[in-house]
């Protein structure tokens, strides 16, 4: 288990992924936290566009960030396996190429929210993915997350254009 | 059953307080370091499909972690 994810590392992800042209969105609780949701989590969840070019860009960016990826692991990511859990780098991260409840990356990208340069899934998409996953911990978290979405919308937050 | 009025008020106050904190501070409070048995015991895992990942979580992880299906 790596040290906890810090703001500086979030900046490194943002900057490295931008340099390599990675198409990604923060999703899950880490995405909600970027939007302002007060809660705790251990890892960052990244929703990645499932294309070979994007997979290759992700591998390059992760290696630059200090992830110790073997060749077979890199191949998994290039191929866009639906779910990849990394605990072999400077922080813990889950790569999700096909999150439950979200039809396509492009659709989620159109609804994304920019938070200080961090691309984040719209709260409706974060909620949809948790509803579809339907894990016990999601079921517990959803009422408060929905309340946050309503609060966030009332405050006038809008998707990026 | 949905949240009651008191819970909603408490949540609203928490959202307001979080909104007053800069992003850097919010992230400092949010990302914690908690060992999760089995889940954190491998440096790398991958699954071809989300269904396979969900099935692995349900079969392998302790129920109290909450990664299994809601019942």
Image (spheres, coloured by chain):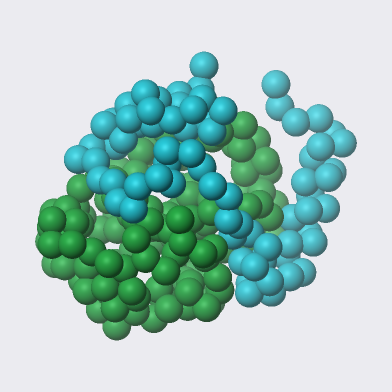
- Answer left or right for B66 relative to A27: right
Q: Position of residue A154 (x, y in %)?
A: 69, 55
Nearest the camera: A106 or B35? B35
Residue occupying the far right of the picture: B6
Q: Residue at x 71, y 27 (%)?
A: B2
Name which quarter of the figure residue A95 lies in. bottom left
Q: Is residue A130 above or below residue A122?
A: above
How many numbered badges does the structure rendering display?
0
Q: Which chain is green?
A: A
> In the picture, which quadrant includes the N terminus of chain A?
bottom left
Q: Position of residue A80 (x, y in %)?
A: 19, 53
Q: Position of residue B18 (x, y in %)?
A: 73, 62
Q: Is residue B43 above or below residue A34?
A: above
Chain B visual colour: cyan
Q: Residue at x 59, y 36 (%)?
A: A142
Q: Is residue A108 visible?
A: no
- Answer left or right for B69 relative to A56: right
Q: Residue at x 83, y 53 (%)?
A: B13
Q: Position of residue A61 (x, y in %)?
A: 28, 74
Name which quarter of the figure residue B57 lies in. top left
Q: Is residue A10 above or below residue A47?
A: below
Residue occupying the far top of the picture: B71
Nearest the camera: A95 or B21? A95
> In the picture, which quadrant includes the C terminus of chain A?
bottom left
Q: Residue at x 36, y 38 (%)?
A: A100
């Amino acid at each position: 288990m790596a040290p906890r994810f810090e703001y500086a590392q979030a900046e490194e992800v943002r900057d490295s992924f931008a340099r390599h042209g990675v198409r990604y969105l923060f999703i899950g609780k880490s995405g909600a936290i970027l939007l302002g949701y007060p809660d705790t989590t251990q890892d960052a969840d990244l929703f990645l566009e499932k294309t070979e070019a994007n997979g290759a860009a992700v591998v390059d960016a992760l290696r630059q960030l200090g992830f110790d990826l073997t060749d077979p692991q890199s191949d998994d990511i290039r191929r866009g396996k639906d779910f990849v859990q990394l605990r072999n780098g400077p922080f813990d991260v889950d790569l999700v190429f096909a999150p439950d409840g979200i039809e396509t990356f492009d659709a989620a990208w159109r609804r994304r929210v920019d938070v200080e340069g961090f691309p984040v899934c719209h709260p409706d998409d974060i909620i949809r993915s948790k509803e579809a996953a339907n894990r016990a911990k999601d079921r517990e978290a959803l009422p408060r997350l929905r309340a946050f979405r309503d609060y966030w919308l009332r405050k006038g937050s809008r998707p990026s254009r | 059953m949905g949240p009651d009025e008191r819970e909603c008020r408490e949540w609203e106050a928490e959202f307001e307080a979080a909104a007053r904190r800069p992003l850097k501070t919010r992230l400092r409070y949010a990302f914690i370091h908690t060992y999760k048995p089995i889940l954190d015991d491998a440096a790398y895992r991958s699954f071809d499909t989300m269904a396979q990942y969900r099935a692995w979580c349900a079969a392998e992880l302790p129920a109290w972690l909450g990664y299994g299906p809601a019942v």
